[in-house]
Amino acid sequence: MALIMVTGGVRSGKSQFAESLAVKYAGYSVLYIATSIPFDDEMKERVRRHRERRPKEWETVEAYNGISDIIRSTDKKAVLLDCLTVMVSNLLLEIDMTWEEKDLEDVDRAEEKITKEVDGLINASKENDKKDVIVVTNEVGMGLVPEYKLGRIFRDISGRMNKKIAENADSVYFMVSGIPLEIKNNCL
């Protein structure tokens, strides 16, 4: 089975395309891992819309850490993680909320923790031969350099985690205005 990455800009159709892949490969035997923490009304509304769009038969787990254990423990035919960049954000904020005051050694320690989580996700994906793992993530390197230190830390770590997933993925799709462009396919 395959590790599949779907990336692109905000509102480019990443989630809907990833959901269509999950249906194609696994039908209703899908575990959906939602990494967001709905902390305000806007985010709660986004989560509600995502839930309504997904098939009711799919199982949903809300988590942003321990992903490798979740992947290993499911008997579903596919796992869809939406999304990696939100997972990175949550892990960063779980470590500390005062990043403007941190030095590069603090950032390196945070990145090590996040890298272990992502490595675990990759390893759990590669260990199995019974399920596809689809990872949705935002492309973070094509915009302006963030003004604030936390934004730059987030962008840099997310970019490196995206690179790590892409290097290990069997297929990578880049979404542009709702159009999927296949940029890697090792499944042929």
Image (cartoon, helix red, strand yellow):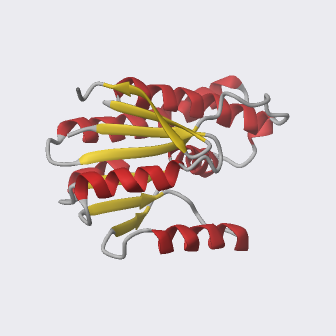
- For residue 187, say whether it is visible: yes
Residue farthest along the left direction in this orientation: 129
Pick the residue in front: 132 or 117: 132
Q: Residue at x 55, y 32 (%)?
A: 111
Q: What number of labels is visible? A: 0
Farthest residue in the right direction?
147
Q: Along the horizontal axis of the image, is 102 left or right of 91? A: right
Of residue 101 and residue 147, the one placed in the foreground of this image is 147
Q: Is residue 134 left or right of residue 86?
A: left
Q: Quadrant of the C terminus?
A: top left
Picture coordinates of residue 63, whole percent (x, y): 45, 59
Q: Residue 49's x, y, as percent?
A: 57, 71
Q: Quadrant of residue 177?
A: top right
Using the image as rendered, state which of residue 23 and residue 155 is in the foreground.
23
Q: Going 31% across and 38% down the picture, which residue do you hit?
A: 3
- Tell me: 58 left or right of 88: left
Residue shown at 71%/49% (left/top)? 97
In this picture, is 117 found above or below 39? above
Q: Nearer the viewer, residue 106 or 78?
A: 78
81 sits left or right of 147 in the view: left
Q: Position of residue 135 (x, y in %)?
A: 42, 44
Vertical relation: 127 (above or below) 50: above
44 lies above or below 30: below
**Among the 4 quarters of the image, the one containing residue 104:** top right
* Quadrant (top left/top right/bottom left/bottom right) for the N terminus: top left
Q: Residue drawn 79% across and 28% down?
A: 145
Place residue 28 in its image quadrant: bottom left
- Location of residue 89 in the rendering, given as x and y in whole percent from the top left corner: 61, 46
Q: Could you tell me if residue 66 is visible in this image?
A: no
